[in-house]
Amino acid sequence: MEIKVLKDILSANDRIAHENQKLLDSKGVLAINVMASPGAGKTSVILQTIAGLKDIIRIGVIEGDVSSSIDTERIAKENVPVLQINTGGECHLDANMVKRALRDMPLDDIDILFIENIGNLICTAEFKIGTHKNLVIASVPEGDDKPLKYPLMFTVADIILVNKIDLLPYSKFDIKAYERSVKGLNENVEVIPVSCATGKGIQRWLKWVTDSKDNIDTEGSAK
Amino acid sequence: MHELAITQGLIDLVLEHAGKSGAKKVLRVNVVAGELSGFVDECMQFYYEQLSKGTIAEDARLSFKRVPTQGRCRDCRNEFIVKDMDWICPECKGNNIQLVKGTELFVESIEVD
C-alpha cells in the first residue's frame, strides 16, 4: 500500500523555529541570523554593531560554534548578554538548539538579538531557527563567485554585507558583477559593501538594523 | 554532517505516517530532493540504516527522485536547467536569473505492508 506523505523533511524543525519566533515577537525582540563562511567577519560585524548602537539599542548575542568559546569571550568584553551554543560537530544551528538557548537569554532586556551561526554557506541556509532576518556576510578574499556556487544561501538572505572592501585594491573581486549575480537570485536583497577594519559602510548597515527594528515592531513580519 | 539531522527528520516523518495508517512494515520511502538541497544519498542511506534499527521502518528502501536546478531568466522569461552552476540564460545570455526549482526536500510517499 502506498501512502502519500508530501511533507517537508525539515517540517519538525520549522515548527520549532516558528515557536521561537512567536516567543521573540511576544518579547518585542528582533532576531537576526548571521551566516557566512568561516573568517568572513561575523563576529567583527557584531562587535561593530554593538559599538555603534549600544547607547540606543539593547543588544544580545547567541554565539554558535562547533567548539571553543573564543568568539563569546570577545563579545562578553562589551558587557552585553551573550550565550554560547557548542554544536559538538553539527555544521549548523537548528531550531531546537536555539530554543534551549533562548530560555537562558534575558529577552526582556534585549531589543535586538544576533544569532551567529556556524561558519558554513551550505546547510545553515536550510535550517530555519526562528529569526526575523537573515544576514549573510561575504568578504572580498572569498572571491565574487560564491553566490553562483552556493545559491541557496543567497536566496534566503534579506541583506548581504560585503566585508573587507579595504582589500579591493589587492583583489580581482568585481563588486558590480557580484551584486548582479546576487540580485538575479534574490531581487529584493540589499547589498552593502563594508569594512570592519576601516569602518567604511558601517553607518549604512547600522541604519538598516535600526530601520528593521522599527518596522518589525509594527508589522511583526518574519521569516 | 547535516545528513544525520535530516535523516532523523525523515525517519520521524516516516514513522508518524506509517503509525497513523496502522502499517506493520515500511517497504520503501520515496524522497524528492532538489539538486541544491545539499545532502549525499549514500550518506543519508548510511544514517538511515543506523537510525531506523529496531523500528518498523528498518530495512526500507530509500528512493531519491532528484529535481534538477531550474532557473528563470528575468529578462526574457526563458526557463532552463542550470548545469554546473552556470547561471547564464541560454537564450539571451543574460545573467539576471531567478532560482525556481532545486531546493525541495520532502517525503512524497511511503510504501507499507
Image (cartoon, rainbow, N blue to C red):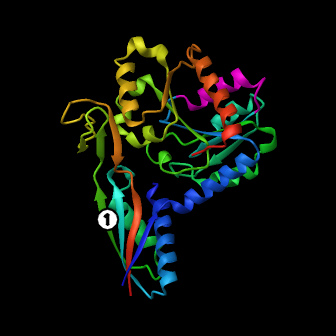
Amino acid on which the number 1 mark rests in the picture? Phe
The kind of secondary structure element at disc 1 is strand
- Give the residue drawn at x 19%, y 36%: B90
- Give the residue drawn at x 66%, y 50%: A21
Q: Does the magenta stretch include residue A163?
A: no
In this picture, residue B52 sits left or right of residue A210: left
> In the rendering, at what x and y percent does residue A32 appear?
62, 38
Residue farthest toward the left in the current orientation of the protein: B91
- Quadrant assignment, res B60: bottom left
- Quadrant assignment, res A184: top left
In this picture, residue B51 sits left or right of residue B62: right
Subunit under mark 1: B
Q: Main secondary structure of the magenta part?
A: helix
> In the rendering, at what x and y percent does residue B83 appear?
23, 43
Q: Is residue A106 visible?
A: no
Residue farthest toward the top in the current orientation of the protein: A169
Q: How many labels does the image show?
A: 1
In this picture, residue A12 sits left or right of residue A206: left
> In the rendering, at what x and y percent does residue A121 appear?
45, 40
Quarter of the picture containing the N terminus of chain B is bottom left
Residue sitting nearer the eye, A165 or A91: A165
Residues in magenta, as a range = A41-58
For residue B90, above or below residue A139:
below
Graded by Cα atoms within 10 Å as few (under 14), some (14 to 19) or many (20 or more), the crowding at tag 1 reads some
Q: Mark 1 points at which residue?
A: B64
Residue sitting nearer the eye, B79 or A9: B79
- Give the residue drawn at x 72%, y 41%: A29
For residue A135, above or below residue A173:
below
> In the rendering, at what x and y percent does residue A43 appear?
60, 31
Q: Is residue B101 visible?
A: yes
Quarter of the picture containing the C terminus of chain B is bottom left
